[in-house]
Image: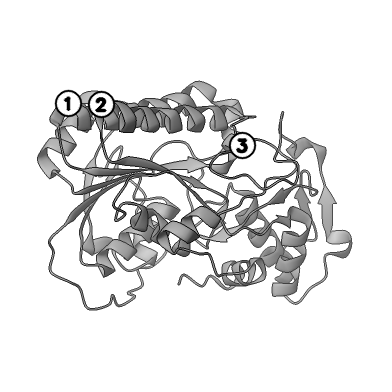
Amino acid sequence: METAPARPCATIPLSDPLPLTRTALIAGITGQDGAYLARHLLQAGYRVVGSSRDAQSSDTSRLCRLGIREDVELISLAPNDFRSVLKALSSIEPAELYNLAGQTSVGLSFEQPVECMESIASGTLNFLEVLRYLGAPTRMFSAGSSECFGDTQQQPATEATAFHPRSPYAVAKSTAYWQVANYREAYGIFCCTGILANHESPLRPHRFVTQKIIDGVRSIARGESHELRLGNLDIWRDWGWAPEYVVAMHRMLQAPVAKDYLIASGHTTSLREFVRLAFVAAGLEPGASLISDATFLRPSDLKYSAMDPSLIAADLGWKANVTPAEIVQRMYDETLV
């Protein structure tokens, strides 16, 4: 996986913390969502413990950019190793567990389908089985994906829409979803899946198409490049702002009943429009700079992915507020809040 260059640590002041009465374990804390969730929980007064496969060598640059690296505890944990999960949960005894670990790239999953299934499905199963074995009161959130629905054909998906996964990544996420549902129903564990639509920020890894667009347009604006090559531009996605989405994750574990929810904006935008907004953010027009390159096409891709997040709004009062234009501008300006 390509790693972004390390950046100097910047300190962003947290709000006045509450007494440290609850411990949260974030599996996958060094990623985009893990870093933003850690900041949110710290602001809420939590003791935050985060895990990566090797805490000694993990890339903590995102935590550093948010100014919270010294406020979180890091441990080594391999989600696909039962003993590793058992040791961590036994020693930490978290009140809340956020399962954000595992492969995150649809494109990469076609190249590494076995690793994708093991990191997502096997890891999720180990967390659930350890909670069952320990009889722990820990509440667990698991990160799902709107990719599980497949192509929605312009009909917004809801929590009742059947899955039709079209990639190894979506198959693995679908498997993890049903594992969570099974353990909730069979053993009474408070566990739930947040079915996440696409959500972006300046902390997105560079292999993601949205960050690739921002990097490419920035390079053109600086005169360092003259073209931006992308695959299929005529795909439609529900794009949101990652710092808002981690609030939904936290809110799901505060609910009186464990329940799965779609976490999305409810608005769909084409990739072509996302590119146009990026050029606008740079004060440019796409023109001949934008080139569609067939070598970037995936074996299978979704043309239309639309979501209806009305249930989480009705039940938990959560709603996405940042518009696609604001998302793109914030990514271009590297606005972290």
- Check contact, mark 1 vs mark 2: CB within 8 A: yes
Residue 53 picture location, percent across and down: 31, 37
Given residues 36 and 66, the one toward you in this image is 36
- Provide the secondary structure element on which disc 1 rests: helix
**Mark 3: which amino acid?**
Phe
**Residue located farthest toward the top when viewing the structure as drawn:** 114
- Provide the secondary structure element on which disc 3 rests: helix
Mark 2 and mark 3: Cα distance apart in space: 26 Å
Q: Residue at x 57, y 35 (%)?
A: 148
Residue 225 seen in render: no
- Check contact, mark 3 vs mark 1: CB within 8 A: no
**Mark 1: which amino acid?**
Tyr
Residue 20: image tag: none
Q: Mark 1 or mark 3, which is nearer the start of the sequence? A: 1
**Residue located farthest toward the right when viewing the structure as drawn:** 288
- Provide the secondary structure element on which disc 2 rests: helix
**Mark 2: which amino acid?**
Glu
Which residue bears the numbered disc 2?
A: 129
Q: Residue at x 89, y 60 (%)?
A: 288
Which residue bears the numbered disc 3?
A: 149
Whether 232 is drawn above or below 188: the answer is below
Quadrant of residue 6 within the rendered picture: bottom left
Residue 133: image tag: 1
Q: Is residue 292 left or right of residue 107?
A: right
